[in-house]
Image (cartoon, rainbow, N blue to C red):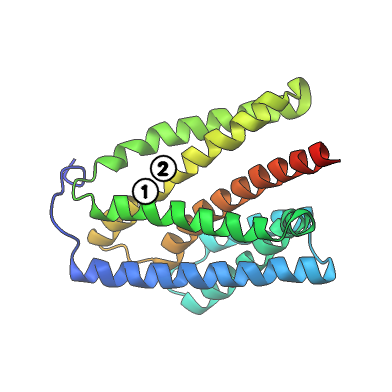
């Protein structure tokens, strides 16, 4: 409750921590982009890369925080395989229209920046209330997605999940940002895990924008044909 009613401005030490988090996040996005390029250029990676990325993420969570160099190496490998797993979608976008990738990246960056700014400039930590609701929505979406994949196969739900997921992960950016601030104020300065949580939010925004733009471009091409 103290965190939720905290109207104090962000402390200098927390600002320094946030700078480190966002610098790490920028490097993660760059490494992931290199992974995407490797797939597009050489065809290496694909669906199995996502499973490797998940395994690396679990390894990162179980690694001792004091072993910073090892954790940085695992984090870099995670970003590479995450990029490789996104590669097929990026390749499809480049085939349809190369501008789609740029538009999706700029869109994801803009959404991320806006919700981050809203969270940072909000002195009252009221956005922390979103955690339970967002977790519940995400769980329901996962269950319905699995049911839709194996039983219903509804195109309408697929589109609904895309747009609802875009809203959910936009809200997660603000929620995770305030969580990082609160944890940093309490002495948790694990910039690696904090950057990783924001990276996942950014990737989810980027993927959903790519899929939406790909679908619109595909429909446009079919109409023109």
Q: Is residue 163 above or below residue 46?
A: above
Q: Is residue 6 above or below residue 185?
A: above
Residue 19, position in %: x, y? Answer: 34, 71
- The front one of 20 and 206 is 206
**Is the C-beta separation of discs 1 and 2 under 8 Å?**
yes
- The quadrant in which the N terminus is found is top left
Q: CA distance from mark 1 to mark 2?
A: 5 Å
- The front one of 213 and 36 is 213
Question: In which quarter of the view is residue 46 placed?
Answer: bottom right
* Residue in the picture at 18% in, 65% down: 11
* Residue in the picture at 83% in, 71% down: 42
Residue at image mark 2: 171
**Disc 2 crowd, CA 10 A, few/some/many (<14, 14-19, 20+):** many
Question: In which quarter of the view is residue 150 placed?
Answer: top right
* Residue in the picture at 47% in, 76% down: 68
Residue ranking furthest to the left: 8
Residue at image mark 1: 174
- The quadrant in which the C terminus is found is top right
- The front one of 25 and 143 is 25
SS assignment at label 2: helix
Residue 134, position in %: x, y? Answer: 44, 35
SS assignment at label 1: helix
Residue ranking furthest to the bottom: 69
Residue ranking furthest to the top: 152
Question: In which quarter of the view is residue 54 placed?
Answer: bottom right
């Amino acid at each position: 409750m103290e965190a939720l009613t905290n109207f104090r401005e962000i402390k200098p030490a927390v600002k320094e921590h946030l700078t480190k988090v966002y610098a790490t996040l920028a490097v993660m996005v760059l490494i992931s982009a290199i992974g995407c390029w490797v797939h597009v250029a050489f065809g290496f990676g694909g669906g199995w890369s996502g499973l490797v990325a998940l395994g690396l993420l679990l390894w990162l969570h179980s690694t001792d925080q004091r072993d910073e160099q090892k954790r940085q190496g695992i984090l870099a490998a995670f970003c590479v395989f995450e990029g490789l797993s996104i590669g097929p979608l990026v390749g499809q976008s480049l085939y349809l229209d190369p501008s789609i990738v740029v538009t999706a990246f700029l869109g994801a960056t803009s959404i991320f920046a806006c919700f981050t700014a809203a969270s940072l400039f909000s002195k009252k930590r009221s956005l922390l209330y979103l955690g339970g609701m967002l977790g519940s929505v995400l769980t329901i979406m996962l269950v319905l997605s699995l049911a839709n994949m194996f039983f219903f196969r509804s195109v309408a739900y697929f589109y609904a999940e895309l747009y609802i997921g875009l809203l959910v992960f936009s809200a997660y950016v603000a929620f995770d940002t305030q969580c990082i601030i609160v944890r940093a104020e309490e002495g948790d300065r694990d910039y690696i895990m904090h950057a990783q949580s924001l990276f996942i939010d950014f990737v989810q925004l980027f993927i959903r924008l790519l899929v939406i733009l790909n679908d619109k471009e595909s429909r446009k091409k079919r109409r023109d044909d």
